Image (tube, rainbow, N blue to C red):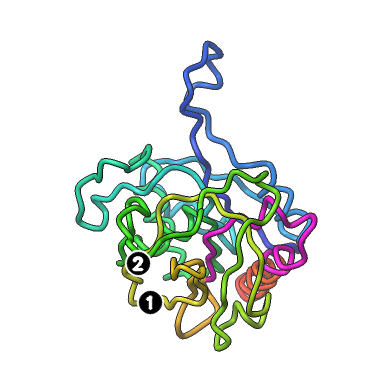
Amino acid sequence: MRPRIALPADTLAEATNVINERNAAFAPRPAIEAIVKSGGVPVIFPSVNPEDVRDYMTLFDGVCFLGGADVDPTFYGEEPFQKLGMTYLKRDLFEIELLKQSVTAGKAIMGICRGMQLINVGLGGTLYQDLSQDLHATLKHSQEAPGNMPSHHVTVDPDSRLNDIIGQRPYVNSRHHQAVKDVAPYLKVTARADDQVIEAIESIDNDQILAVQWHPENIYKHFEDSRKLFKDFINRSQKVADKTRK
């Protein structure tokens, strides 16, 4: 039985005259394809009342928190900075509760871009609401190159699971204006850009969580590093499935 992978959905916020597209829940097609190609079965979860999260917990083995809007800064005790982008409170509330219950339940967890930031905030960390707040951030982190092409390198901690998976100097794509600031107690930094912006985090004492700031779902077709990230996530999810479905 292949592992079931939860993909918490984004919400279509653009104005539309098509009634069924108004606030429609969706997951990015590249993420769906990356999960399928790596051996997982994607299950898309719309943002619902956080009290309903418990009813979702038996439906998946691993969860991948995806990109999207900025995380509401009130979750880490700040008011909105003037360069904060669009936020969506309903999604944040649902995903933070889904994260917490997934950690407790031992689910495999992956984060991509906003997903990495959401994981950090949900477990007690903080963010730079905009990279202009980080005086050391000098690289272009919101690339103008095509999204399926890499734009800068990151350096991976040699003493990390991430290094075991993709090596020490991957070439990655980049389209973010927020970044991890204070790392949550449960997590450690495992990769940085050359300007020291945090590019990856993982859980300290086990292999439950691995999250990256870039978008491997957009480049996995052509870059082996990205395929390895998804394969690792599916392998971790398979272990959960094997344990819980005996």
If the image is split into quadrants, where does the C terminus sit? Answer: bottom right
Residue 238 relative to residue 81: left or right: right
Segment tinted magenta in the rendering:
210-230
Number of disc labels:
2
Residue under the image location 27 percent in, 50 percent down:
73
Q: CA distance from mark 2 to mark 1?
A: 7 Å
Q: Quadrant of the N terminus?
A: bottom right
Residue depicted at 50% across the width and 77% down the height:
190
Furthest residue toward top: 17
Which numbered tag is attached to residue 186?
Answer: 1
Percent position of residue 216, x then y = 65, 58
Q: Earlier in the sequence, mark 2 or mark 1?
A: 2
- Please say if the residues under marks 2 and 1 sit with CB atoms less than 8 Å apart: yes
Q: Pick the residue in front: 150 or 237.
A: 150
In front of the other: 27 or 136: 136
Q: Quadrant of residue 76?
A: bottom left
Circle 2: is it few (<14), some (14-19), or many (20+) Cα within 10 Å? Answer: some
Instruction: Kindly identify the amino acid type of the residue bearing the numbered disc 1.
Output: Tyr
Q: Is residue 129 magenta?
A: no
Instruction: Say the numbered circle drawn on residue 1.
Output: none
Which residue is disc 2 drawn over?
123
